[in-house]
Amino acid sequence: MPDTIIETHQLTKVFGNNGNAVHALRGIDLTVARGEFVALVGPSGSGKSTLMAILGCLDSPSGGTYALGGRWVHGLSGAELARVRNEQIGFVFQSYNLLPRASVRRNVELPMLYAGLGRRERRRRAGELLEQVGIADKAEALPAQLSGGQRQRVAVARALANGPALLLADEPTGALDSHTGHEVLALFRELHARGNTVLLVTHDPTVAALAERKVEIHDGLIQLPSAAAAAAGAPAEPGEPGQVAAAAGEPGEPRQDAAAADSVSAAAAAEPSPDAAAAADLAATRAARRPPRRRRGR
């Protein structure tokens, strides 16, 4: 479907094997339409960040299917996933993941550098994005010279650099004070109003309430609206949108611990983050573009 950005069917993720297997995701069916603002909500250990890592092509599922913008991505190679991340997905993380020794402008330019844009176009586009998020005057500053809210605005500008089909935000206000957090959330609502598709991962119901739709996940399963309402002690509203997880976990099956479920930091390095990981992602992208060598005759 052309207006569908995310479509998953029976998505599963298992860490470990045999007696040590941890079922982080137990059969996720999720659809997100183009232009939606969706909050993915759940406590620590629920599997929400594991799901985000798969939706962001930072990790691969153990089973099931995933289509991003109509293209199946669950079986792509590492180099192909790197290209998808760079061209179609913008990431905003709680810890910002800015390059500490690069200026604000250079941080915003980084995804465009991976995509092969020329220097002049990168500078022009970075200037426009920094203006859009309200910190154009900080273009030559280093991340350490910015406040937390300003760093997150840089991260948002970087996420928008290549005009992604999907903007993924993992606890984007988690490291901010309440006032600054409200400012960043207002920015996300503004981006949504401009037509961007936003998927925001949070454990905070106040943050989730700002989204157009809320999807709740517990123990690796997306909750039916009626089940979520029962858990909250309130009746479900008829017709409330929600996605159904078609597979139930076995009784006594271990739930994913918080460290495994909500640690995206290792995988998150693939989208501009610490220097070594960023270089590895760039190398993978270049390798995908390089034509195969011809064997020379003797």
Image (tube, grey):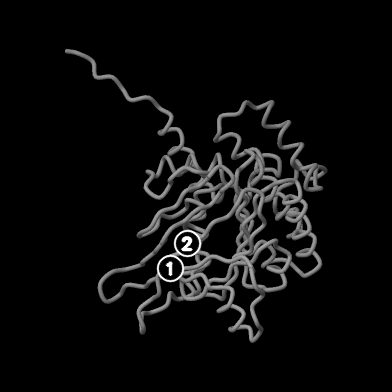
Q: Is residue 175 left or right of residue 136?
A: left
Q: Is 75 rendered above or below residue 44? A: above
Query: Nearest the camera: 240 or 165?
Result: 240
Q: Residue at x 67, y 75 (%)?
A: 237
- Distance between mark 2 and mark 1 Cα atoms: 7 Å
Q: Is 80 rendered above or below residue 148? A: above
Q: Residue at x 30, y 75 (%)?
A: 20
Identify the residue under disc 1: 246
Query: Nearest the camera: 239 or 22?
Result: 239
x, y percent for residue 213? 66, 63
x, y percent for residue 260? 45, 69
x, y percent for residue 273? 56, 50
Mark 1 and mark 2 in contact (Cβ < 8 Å)?
yes
Disc 2 residue crowd, few under 14, some 14–19, many 20+, Cα 10 Å: many
Q: Tag 2: residue type?
A: Asp
| Numbered tag placed on residue 29 in the rendering | 2
Query: Nearest the camera: 188 or 212?
Result: 212
Q: Is 223 rendered above or below residue 55? A: below
